[in-house]
Image (cartoon, rainbow, N blue to C red):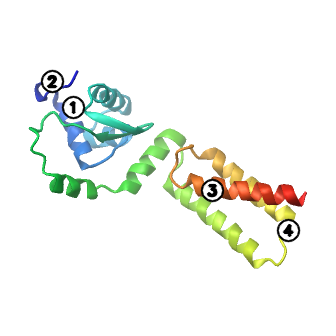
């Protein structure tokens, strides 16, 4: 059952205003609307059930169909509003909310991986013990990352390569 604008209360309208800016997590919505995160989650779930928002990933929502609009959507204006949102902050909020880590942690892990790659490339022959250390460090970092975290796939690929190299060297 679709909602119409008369079914919305003030909090619903404020949440829709936030989602007009772009994708959001319940934590981000809660902070912007000045409500609790559990209440924001409940409101987003209700809006999801009625097709007003779409869940893109666990805890990440996007406006799908604003019942306040009459169908004469100005797509250029909508694109401008979405472009103003700092996606990095939204991803950071989502990572902290769901996994207790942020984008900076991902950046640090990526820097560690890049450092390991540079050291390996500088060596004439790969030291199996150092490769095993790099593999174990990468595995520890990947354990902290959610399966759908941005940047996880290249890290998992690097781990698979290190697994092959270390296993072949043993």
For the C terminus, give its image quadrant: bottom right
Q: Which residue is mark 3?
A: 155
Tell me which residue sits at (27%, 38%) in the image.
34
Q: Which residue is mark 1?
A: 12
Tell us which disc is closer to us: 2 or 1.
2
Q: For residue 131, which quarter of the picture?
A: bottom right
Tell me which residue sits at (32%, 32%) in the image.
40
Q: Residues within 10 Å of mark 3 (few under 14, many from 20)?
A: some
126 vs 86, left or right, is: right
Q: Secondary structure at mark 1?
A: helix
Between marks 4 and 3, how big is the CA–CA gap? 20 Å
Between marks 2 and 1, how big is the CA–CA gap? 9 Å
Residue nearest the observer in this picture, 161 or 94: 161
> Residue 103: which disc?
none
- Proximity of marks 2 and 1: CB atoms separated by less than 8 Å: yes
24 vs 165, left or right, is: left
Furthest residue in direction right, as rendered: 170
Residue 102 placement (x, y as % from top left) = 50, 51
Q: For residue 138, which quarter of the picture?
A: bottom right
98 vs 158, left or right, is: left
- Proximity of marks 4 and 1: CB atoms separated by less than 8 Å: no
- Proximity of marks 2 and 4: CB atoms separated by less than 8 Å: no
Q: Secondary structure at mark 3?
A: helix
**Residue 84 visible in the shown view:** no
> Residue 7: which disc?
2
Residue 122 placement (x, y as % from top left) = 75, 78
Dot 2 or dot 3: first in sequence order is 2
Tell us which disc is closer to us: 2 or 3.
3
Q: Which residue is mark 4?
A: 127
For the N terminus, give its image quadrant: top left
């Amino acid at each position: 059952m679709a909602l119409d604008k008369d079914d919305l209360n003030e909090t619903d309208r404020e949440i829709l205003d936030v989602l007009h800016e772009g994708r959001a997590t319940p934590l981000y919505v809660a902070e912007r609307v000045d409500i609790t995160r559990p209440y924001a989650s409940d409101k987003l779930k209700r809006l999801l059930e009625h097709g007003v928002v779409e869940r893109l990933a666990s805890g990440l929502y996007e406006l799908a169909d604003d019942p306040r609009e009459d169908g004469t959507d100005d797509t250029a204006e909508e694109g401008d509003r979405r472009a103003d949102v700092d996606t990095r902050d939204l991803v950071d909020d989502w990572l902290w909310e769901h996994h207790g880590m942020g984008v900076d942690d991902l950046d640090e892990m990526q820097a560690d991986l890049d450092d390991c790659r540079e050291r390996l490339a500088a060596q004439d022959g790969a030291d199996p013990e150092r490769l095993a250390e790099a593999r174990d460090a990468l595995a520890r970092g990947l354990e902290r990352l959610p399966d759908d975290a941005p940047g996880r796939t290249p890290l998992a690929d690097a781990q698979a390569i290190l697994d092959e190299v270390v296993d072949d060297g043993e």
